[in-house]
Amino acid sequence: MCRIDKCSFFFFFFFFFFLSQGVAVQCRRRVAFWFHRESGVWSWCSRLFATVATAVMNRESFAAGERLVSPAYVRQGCEARRSHEHLIRLLLEKGKCPENGWDESTLELFLHELAIMDSNNFLGNCGVGEREGRVASALVARRHYRFIHGIGRSGDISAVQPKAAGSSLLNKITNSLVLDIIKLAGVHTVANCFVVPMATGMSLTLCFLTLRHKRPKAKYIIWPRIDQKSCFKSMITAGFEPVVIENVLEGDELRTDLKAVEAKVQELGPDYILCIHSTTSCFAPRVPDRLEELAVICANYGIPHIVNNAYGVQSSKCMHLIQQGARVGRIDAFVQSLDKNFMVPVGGAIIAGFNDSFIQEISKMYPGRASASPSLDVLITLLSLGSNGYKKLLKERKEMFSYLSNQIKKLSEAYNERLLHTPHNPISLAMTLKTLDEHHDEAVTQLGSMLFTRQVSGARVVPLGSVQTVSGYTFRGFMSHTNNYPCAYLNAASAIGMKMQDVDLFIKRLDKCLKAVRKEQSKESDDNYDKTEDVDIEEMALKPDNVLLDTYQDASS
């Protein structure tokens, strides 16, 4: 289970009950009865008990301190510590993200208490094995809060490590908090999830490899096209043949061709199809797949359904699609990135699903132990934000999407372009670049280079006719999600954490770059242009000093 194990609940209940009666020794003896039932799980609970039982010693220590400092002051300090411990106790009891974020002192106390439960931090530990949590650099140890053993065991990334009770508890709590946030974001019936220390692509591969054992005849994965390399290579790496389903153009939007998907299922045969691999979050004018209809097709033909929800947790619309797909049809697992949804360093993902046993199978497919860094990062982040803080970020992202949309619309009209109408995409926007493409094939890519040089990251300029080969498969019109989109365009996205000043600075720099490109085009088309009076606008637009000046001006305004 992704929630805190039952042993934690019983442990705390009995411990605090007996402690209140002043009989901690009897408490230890009675709880020991359950510790021996399952050596693995109860071993880390025993370590947890030993740590929390120091509350008895704390009282003695405080009493001793009263001989040195005024008892009133000591009692005040004792009460202050209890307020931190109360927050920790509530977290362990409920296994949910606290409503309000913790301060750093509570977080560090909690992490320290967990870390000293790992054997590498025992004062009298004598390690004679090949993996004893030895670290050569003290800086590295501090960077990881001295959680050195990682998470999981050789047979299961979610399993408890006897020599690393603190790290194991950290892993359990993190998975529990993440499950709570996924429900808060809109997928209310999710059954289980776990954090895996791999990015989205490799996490998808892990899901496909798990399905291989269930469907030994399967050779193909049906994949509505999205021009993103890692999700495509995830299928190749797992040893399957992607069957690319081209999207259909509806207005400006590229949408799932459901008839083509079902026709391909009938042509290949359900037994030979590993799964349908669909997508939610994507770059406009591509929009999220028709998840409900795909889920119904999967249910009707008995085919698994894996969803690439890379940065969809931040979008209520993407999460609603997953929830509805599971309600009306079949979704086996959905995978989301940690860095894109929770603003932590790259390197982690969440694998979640509606069938607890299948998610456990995926966790057992992971070979060996794993790094605890992604789990630690997201745990610290969620405890710092609290559920209210995360909900606030989701709300702000929606507001920034509307603001970004309005600003791009205004700018595009000023240059005889337009904002593409993609109402089904809740995160990404696209602005046409027809006037640039009509004048010069290289003008579109030049605009992308200028934006990058002006320190605008994340914006994508998509020219017409680009050809790209990925793992032996050739895609025409690569990056546009179709062979022949009607026009070149520029992408920008409103992702979690974006601020109004980011939008304003982007629009300001895009405006300057568009002026520079237009100026260059007019120079080339004007045979009588006086080069002696030329002012290199592009060069001026790209000077680092001008970039910094833009930033300072926006910060002060």
Image: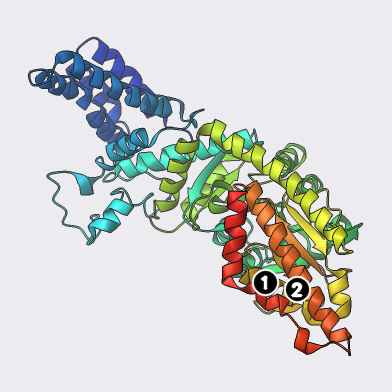
Q: Which quadrant of the structure image shows residue 122? A: top left
> Residue at (31%, 49%) from the top-left corner?
147
Q: Earlier in the sequence, mark 1 or mark 2?
A: 2
Q: Is residue 350 left or right of residue 257?
A: left
Q: Please, what secondary structure does the residue beneath circle 1 have? A: helix
> Which residue in the protein does label 2 denote?
516
Colour scheme employed for the rendering of this structure: rainbow
Is 480 situated above or below 14?
Answer: below
For badge 1, the amino acid type reads: Ala
Question: Nearest the camera: 86 or 95?
Answer: 86
Residue 441 locus on image (x, y percent): 82, 81
Residue 11 locus on image (x, y percent): 33, 24
For badge 2, the amino acid type reads: Ala
Residue 525 locus on image (x, y percent): 88, 85
> Residue at (30%, 39%) from the top-left corner?
114
Residue 308 visible somewhere in the drawing: no
Hey, which residue is sitting farthest left in the picture?
A: 67
Is 179 situated above or below 121?
Answer: above
Mark drawn on residue 541: 1
> Residue at (31%, 48%) from the top-left corner?
145
Q: Please, what secondary structure does the residue beneath circle 2 have? A: helix
Is 212 situated above or below 164?
Answer: below
Q: Is residue 493 left or right of residue 519?
A: left
Residue contact at pointers 1 and 2, CB within 8 angstroms: yes
